[in-house]
Amino acid sequence: MPHQRPQITHASRPLTFMVVATDEHGASVETEIAGEGPLTLYLDKREIVTLMTLGAAPEALAIGYLRNQRLLTSIEQISAVQVDWETDAVAITTRHYPKNAAQKKLSAATLDKRLSKRTVTTGCGQGTVFGDLMEEIDHIHLSKDAILQEATLQALLDNVRRYDSLYKKAGALHGCALAKDSEILYYVEDVGRHNAVDAIAGMMWLDEVDGHDKIFYTTGRLTSEMVIKAAQMGVPFLVSRSGLTKMGWEIAQRVGMTMIGRAQGKHFLLFTGAERFRHSSPISEVIAA
């Protein structure tokens, strides 16, 4: 049964700006650069956080942030998401907004407890994860039936390379993609990879997309934050052109995620979850070659 979709604005703002730079020959060159600005998130009139963002999908970013921070548990809880760039703010209103003083006090106490413990992560621009990082890890169960073929991985990497990304024009951005087999369903770029993954998480909630058979690709490194967020989205495959951290590797093993790093060209390194991956040629033939 379709969920009750929240009312949302569609307030994307200009993503790039033209500035004049001087090249190595001393000549003036008009150059396209990425936009960046603050977006303060309010949940039922309570200020939660200020995000530095490109502003491509601010509503999805706000929804995905609340999802990945575990401040909300379902899209049905959200009544409206309104972005106002004049005040650099996004207001999220929930359907269970407390109506009386007692309810307000209880709601505030619950949120206070959730926000009281925060961990600044290694995400670009310093991501923040509220609550205990490992609080729900042991309750996450990723699909064991999903299989990733090497040919599918290579086709996805080729599609990502060919994608008309903003990074090719302006640089200074991280990109994340959600794919079904090699087909890219969403591709989001932002000044921080944690923003890009949150925006995709929001899009998945809005469109009722399940992650159990999907592949998540990121240009950024595979840190604990990235692994936890992908796991919370139910995605069993996490792929990056970059490397990974020890904690990211440990958590991927713990949740049973298939994690692939250094994926560029035909090269890749399979770090965890090898049981879901199928090489094009048997390992014995690869070693013999």
Image: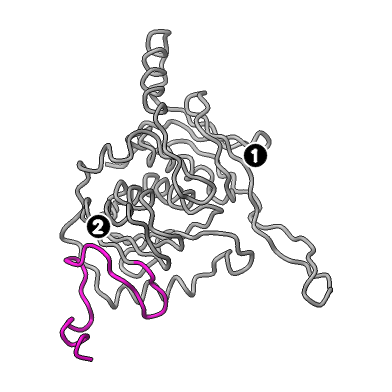
User: What residue is drawn where x is 21% and y is 51%?
Assistant: 254
Magenta residues span: 261-289
Res. 31 mark: none
Q: Quadrant of residue 75?
A: top left
Q: How far apart are marks 2 and 1 (CA)?
A: 38 Å
Q: Residues within 10 Å of mark 1 (few under 14, many from 20)?
A: some
Q: Where is residue 283 drawn, in percent x and y? A: 18, 81
- Label 1 sits on a secondary structure element that is loop
Q: Of 255 and 33, which appears nearest the observer?
A: 255
Q: How is the image coloured?
A: one colour
**Residue 189 left/right relative to 250:** right
As displayed, is residue 214 above or below residue 224? below
User: What residue is drawn where x is 30% and y is 60%?
Assistant: 214
User: What residue is drawn where x is 20% and y is 42%?
Assistant: 138
Query: What residue would you read off at disc 2?
Result: 257
Type of residue at label 1? Trp
Q: Where is residue 5 drawn, in percent x and y? A: 40, 38
Query: What residue would you read off at disc 1?
Result: 85
Q: In which quarter of the image is residue 178?
A: bottom left
- Label 2 sits on a secondary structure element that is loop
As displayed, is residue 10 above or below residue 258? above
Check residue 277 for magenta coloring: yes
Q: Of 255 and 97, which appears nearest the observer?
A: 255
Nearer the N terminus, badge 2 or badge 1? 1
Type of residue at label 2? Met
Q: Where is residue 195 drawn, in percent x and y? A: 49, 49
Q: Where is residue 156 drawn, in percent x and y? A: 37, 72
**Residue 164 left/right relative to 207:** right
Q: Of 31 and 180, which appears nearest the observer?
A: 31
Q: Residues within 10 Å of mark 2 (few under 14, many from 20)?
A: many
Check residue 175 for magenta coloring: no
As displayed, is residue 103 above or below residue 20? above
